[in-house]
């Protein structure tokens, strides 16, 4: 009986492991693409100029073959240039962008990978966003992998075991690369003065081999109406125009 239960437990564990692997998603953006993971949109962009000073990053990480860190003015892991380009932000700093009727908070990442063969690609292997009413400074890591496993407050978004792969064809740090849009609904109950922490880990699936990976806030954009919303307006204008033409023709006949 014990042996049977043990066997059943092993089978269940194996099925769970297979299910976890099957559910993992790899979004390959290439040099121009998009994809969705756990409700967040990842899409390439080519914004210019986005050099430091214009780009105004709040998170900067750099190391090889992999790197990790989160925005804190005191620094942690592989973060650089505290506190000017790596520092805390508050919830009130985030701005809303509306895409297809859904409100998102937008973040832009400037990737700085070499453009040579077999060096241009990089993977985002972890992305977590937290909010907290107090400053956070955890540097807890898994003893085997060295990956950050601490908490920075209330978890609002998690990439999970999924990956986003990007092929950097832009030159240097003068052009934006990846936009990340996280649903506003994920931040329900957050206060305006709460701190927002973004943890990133790059290079585990495809190595980081270049300069800084910088992340900045995307300024809010007004919603762009879908084409279908224009059709009733166009129809109304056509109807009004047609009526006006008919009236003119009738008046012309009466006067003649």
Image (cartoon, grey):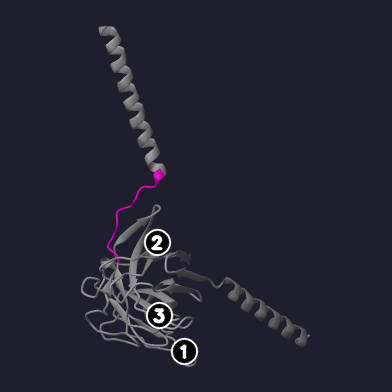
| Residue 110 drawn at (x, y percent) | 33, 73
- Residue matched to label 1: 142
In this rendered view, identify the residue nearer to me: 148 or 42.
Answer: 42
Comparing marks 1 and 2, which lies closer to the viewer? Answer: 1
Q: Residues within 10 Å of mark 3 (few under 14, many from 20)?
A: few
Q: CA distance from mark 3 to mark 1?
A: 33 Å
| Residue 89 drawn at (x, y percent) | 27, 73
For the N terminus, which image quadrant?
Answer: bottom right
- Residue matched to label 3: 116
Give the mark nearer the N terminus: 2 vs 3.
3
- Residue matched to label 2: 185
Give the mark nearer the N terminus: 1 vs 2.
1
Q: Residues within 10 Å of mark 1 (few under 14, many from 20)?
A: few
Residue 174 horizontal side relative to residue 146, left or right:
left
Residue lying at the far front in this picture: please name it: 117
Residue 110 in view of the camera: yes
Q: CA distance from mark 1 to mark 2?
A: 30 Å
Residue 15, picture quadrant:
bottom right
Helix, strand or loop at mark 3: loop
Task: Identify the residue at image location x=43%, y=89%.
Answer: 141
Q: Is residue 223 magenta?
A: yes
Find the magenta span and give its range: 218-227
């Amino acid at each position: 009986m014990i042996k049977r239960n043990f066997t059943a437990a092993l089978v269940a564990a194996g099925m769970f492991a297979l299910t976890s692997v099957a559910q993992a998603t790899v979004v390959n953006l290439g040099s121009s693409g998009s994809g969705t993971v756990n409700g967040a949109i990842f899409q390439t962009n080519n914004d210019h100029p986005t050099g430091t000073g214009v780009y105004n990053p709040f998170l900067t990480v750099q190391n090889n073959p992999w790197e990790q860190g989160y925005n804190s003015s005191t620094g942690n892991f592989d973060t650089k240039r505290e506190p000017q380009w790596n520092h805390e932000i508050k919830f009130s700093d985030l701005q809303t962008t509306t895409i297809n009727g859904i409100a998102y908070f937008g973040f832009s990442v400037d990737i700085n990978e070499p453009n040579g063969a077999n060096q241009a690609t990089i993977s985002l292997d972890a992305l977590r966003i937290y909010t907290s009413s107090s400053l956070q400074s955890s540097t807890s890591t898994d003893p085997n992998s060295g990956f950050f496993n601490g908490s920075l407050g209330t978890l609002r978004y998690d990439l999970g075991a999924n990956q986003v792969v990007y092929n950097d064809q832009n030159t240097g740090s003068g052009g934006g690369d990846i936009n990340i849009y996280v649903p506003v609904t994920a931040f329900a109950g957050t206060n305006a003065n709460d701190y927002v922490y973004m943890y990133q880990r790059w290079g585990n699936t495809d190595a980081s081999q270049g300069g800084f990976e910088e992340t900045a806030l995307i300024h809010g954009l007004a919603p762009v109406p879908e084409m279908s919303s224009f059709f009733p307006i166009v129809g109304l204008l056509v109807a009004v125009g047609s009526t006006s033409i008919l009236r003119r023709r009738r008046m012309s006949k009466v006067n003649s």
